[in-house]
Amino acid sequence: MSRVSSESLAQAQTLLESKLGSNPAELAKELFAVLGIVDSNAGLRRALTDPSREGQDKANLFSSLLDGKVSGATKEIAAQLAGSRWGDPRDIGDALETLGATAAISSAEKNGSEGLERLEDELFSFVRVVASSHDVQRALDAPQATAESKEKLAFALVPDASEATKTLIGQAVSTPRGHKATDLVQSFIGLVAKRQQRWIANVSVTRPLTDEQLRRLQNGLNNLYQRDLKINVNVNPALIGGIRVEVGDEVVDATSATRLSELRRRLAS
């Protein structure tokens, strides 16, 4: 994906995060449905990614097309994608796929880091089972087989899978978009792994923490991020500012004075 497309995807992901609180599982299904509409209509794809066309005009076009078919949240995300810039017509579909998968992964996250771990394990299990059988591989790749039959076979391979797992595997086998289903599932596993980083705090400090300081740090970070984080502590005497915290893509360091002051206060109290 080109730089301009990556920037458009990043903006859409920010919007998506604000919409995940209500029903991410349904949001995932709707985004995948919108992807199906885009993939099945080359003319629409060209219209939505035409650089000579006004972004608002493209957003209005897509919104009117989806009116009454999807929720307001899905329509808003789709409109933002349509109004953004794309380096290649296929990129908008790739973005929708990523957003749909992220929403499905977020639905597993309702059960905390354990939900993400279960999702990852089930997706890995599917990949391993498929890799162990040439007959299954041929059945999933067969062009004459229906999407429904492929989904039925895939779900039988992971009979106790969660709904999030079924959503992602179902998407991969029914709409692989030119990829092998297992390759697409592998890409979804990568998104799960990235999501798991939101539950890990990598903390750098200038000197070892006492058990009491570690407890206070744990409580402070849990309150700050509103989830039970796993904390990894690294001692770095050369650290400027006394403490540095990385959670996912977010870094709290000497430039984040307010948050750092709060964490230092909790450690010292």
Image: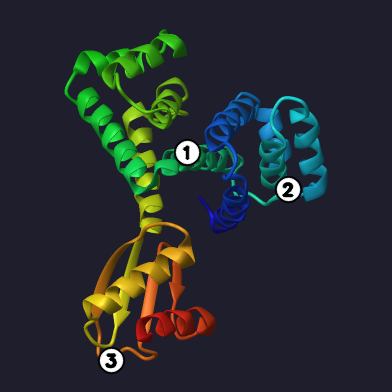
Give me the disc on residue 83.
Answer: 2
C-alpha distance separating marks 1 and 2: 27 Å
Quarter of the image containing the C terminus? bottom left
Give me the disc on residue 238.
Answer: 3
Amino acid type shown at disc 1: Ser
Percent position of residue 216, x then y = 34, 74
Percent position of residue 4, x then y = 60, 57
Q: Count neighbours of disc 2 (C-alpha within 10 A) and say few if under 14, some if 14 to 19, many if 20 or more.
A: many
Residue drawn at point x = 39 percent, y = 90 percent: 241
Give the SS element for disc 3.
loop
Is residue 54 at least partly visible in the picture?
Answer: no
Q: Count neighbours of disc 3 (C-alpha within 10 A) and say few if under 14, some if 14 to 19, many if 20 or more.
A: few
Residue 224 vertical position relative to residue 57 in the rendered view, above or below: below
Amino acid type shown at disc 3: Ala
Percent position of residue 92, x then y = 60, 41
For mark 1, what is the residue? 107
Give the SS element for disc 2.
helix
C-alpha distance separating marks 1 and 3: 41 Å
Q: Count neighbours of disc 1 (C-alpha within 10 A) and say few if under 14, some if 14 to 19, many if 20 or more.
A: many
Nearer the observer, 32 or 118: 118
Q: Quadrant of residue 185?
A: top left
Nearer the observer, 139 or 236: 236
Residue drawn at point x = 32 percent, y = 69 percent: 202
N-terminal of the two: label 1 or label 2?
Answer: 2
Give me the disc on residue 212.
Answer: none
Residue drawn at point x = 34 percent, y = 37 percent: 119
Give the SS element for disc 1.
helix
Percent position of residue 91, x then y = 56, 43
Q: Which label sits in the foreground, 1 or 2?
A: 1
Is residue 11 at least partly visible in the picture?
Answer: yes
Nearer the observer, 188 or 238: 238
- Residue 116 vs residue 87: left or right? left
